Amino acid sequence: MREDVIRWLSSQPLADLIVDEVEGLRGVPDLVAATVMADVLTARLTMSLNPVCRPWDAYVLQTIGSGITQEDLRHLLAGDWKAWRRTCLARLIKQGWIAHDGGPENDDSRTWLAVDGFDNPFTRLTAVNLKLRDWRSGFWQAKHCSTYVDASYLVLPVAAISEECLQSMQKGGLGLLGLQDSGVTEVVAPQPAPWVDTLTKRTVSERLIAAVRYPELSARRAGSPGSPGVRVWNKMPVAETSSARRTA
């Protein structure tokens, strides 16, 4: 079943990369496909810095950006400043992603800076959940995934697709793939979600980078060990990928 779906995804123009079971904070889809800007991904893979796979670390890094005073950073992060310094800020400093200008620790005029290169190489993410019979469970899994990806699919054998299932998928804006001996068919096309959790989406993107960078490790952070990780990576020429994706 999974291999049939991977072949179908691989035939789609928006699936340059397919990875098994990437944790998305709201469930773990069986497959995640991504559209890749190859030049950006190549740059991220050649950096000495590891991907930022914790959501709040990614949030802090994006907040600091090209530079911010400690006073502004404290206001934006809110909450317990000492806890932020002890957790996210400490981790990002140790990893080499951020630094400050050396001012006193309690001086709010101190400037925080982030290293250049925290770019997202993925322009579109697609989540896929596979079920043999229980479409209701699959529906809610796909619905959860739809909050942080651009398209979310449920895959079922054609014989298991009821009228109730079909209507629920259509009303939910979710994609439905039907599996039969002849292969996979798109029964319902997914609709754009009205709202996307950009922080979770960015965290999933960082975990995809980690899966490509460390293919010997499972891309999945929860559940059964030994996941195959990266399944398909169509490495297109940098110039072709960057120009085609950015002008699409």
Image (cartoon, grey):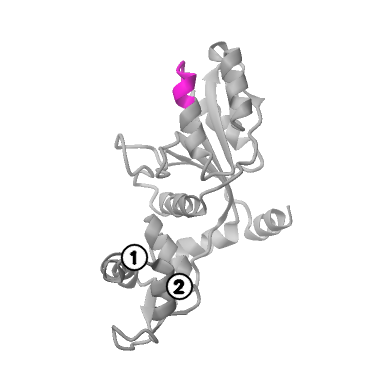
| Mark 1, other Cα within 10 Å: few <14 / some 14–19 / many ≥20 | few
Q: Quadrant of residue 167?
A: top right
Q: Which residue is mark 2?
A: 64
- Give percent across and percent down for residue 239: 67, 60
Pointer 2 with pointer 1, Cβ within 8 A = no
The Cα–Cα distance between marks 2 and 1, rounded to whole angstroms, is 16 Å
Task: Say whether residue 183 is visible.
Answer: no
Q: Amino acid at mark 1?
A: Gly
- Depth order, front residue of 50/133: 133
Q: What label does residue 79 carry, if any?
A: 1
Please tell me whether residue 25 is drawn above or below residue 46 in the rendered image: above
Say which residue appears at 39% left-offset and 71% top-offset.
97
Q: Mark 2 or mark 1, which has the lower sequence index?
A: 2
- Give percent across and percent down for residue 206: 45, 55
Say which residue appears at 38% left-offset and 59% top-offset.
56
- Depth order, front residue of 196/226: 196
Q: Which residues are magenta?
A: 131-138
Q: Quadrant of residue 176?
A: top right
Q: Amino acid at mark 2?
A: Ile
